[in-house]
Amino acid sequence: MAVVYDLNMNVIALIAKAIGYALLVLLVARLYKKQSKQSPFIAVILVVLIGLFSFTINIPINDSIISLSILPLGVWILFFILKRKEGRWATYRSYAWLGFGANYLFLAIQLFAIPIHHLVYPEDKLETYVAVVENTAIISTHPSGKEACLDEKRLIKQVTTAKEEPFYSEEWYYETFVGSESGGNERFPYLLIGAGPKWGSGLHALTFIEQDGKGVLVSTRKHQLYYRMEDSVFCR
């Protein structure tokens, strides 16, 4: 059975990006009004956009990746193109550098948005990843998984109270694939399907259920989180 990810976008990041571009437009408009000789506005916008182009390095911060602009490649390109005609580079130089400087404006907004995202969508809470639980079900992903069904009401009741516990990946791998001659039993033989994260979080994860129905393993592109519930979510 194919696993379909929820097409959930990161609303915080989209808002931050929109704010960044709005501020850039205001800065361009302000600079444009100050110019004694105003150039075609379309040409100004094009120069600013080319000025944004830069050589960047990616830096990981709190499970997020930020891009730090190092070299103003767009400014250099514009310089070599515009210097061919006298006075052209002097006319558009400030717009080119404004475009490059906007990279740091976007960086500052992104750094501000990261803690806001963690505050609105805490990535250590099960309810962030399993927020939409209507029409959910479980399927067996390993021969050791017995036939079972999901009790949605019991799952909904315990999502907000589930406690995160240590995830012993190496130990559990040894128990499953090394510690038994028969290949062992998969600790999480069930996959929760139909569940979705909080709207606007932009988070996507696979959610596995433990053999006893009380453990939940959330696997994202960044990390794996393990939670325990007081009662099994299997039908009785």
Image (spheres, grey):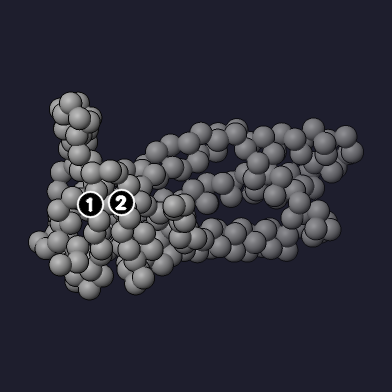
Q: In the image, is 153 to the left or to the right of 191?
A: left
Where does label 2 land, which residue?
140
Decide: is 152 above or below 83.
below
Earlier residue among tags 1 and 2? 2
Camera-side residue of 112 and 227: 227
User: Residue at image x 74%, y 55%?
Assistant: 45
Give the amino acid at mark 1. Lys
Of circles 1 and 2, which is in front? 1
Q: Residue 210 at what x, y percent from top left?
A: 20, 50
Q: Residue 214 at what x, y percent from top left?
A: 15, 56
Q: Residue 216 at what x, y percent from top left?
A: 22, 53
Q: Residue 46 at what x, y percent from top left?
A: 76, 51
Give the amino acid at mark 2. Ser
User: Residue at image x 70%, y 49%?
Assistant: 49
Q: 10 Å neighbourhood of mark 2: few (<14), some, or many (≥20)?
A: some
Q: Label for residue 146?
A: 1
Marks 1 and 2 close (CB-CB < 8 Å): yes
Q: How many labels does the image show?
A: 2
Camera-side residue of 195 and 232: 232
Whether residue 12 is visible, yes or no, is: no
- Name the quadrant containing residue 96: top right
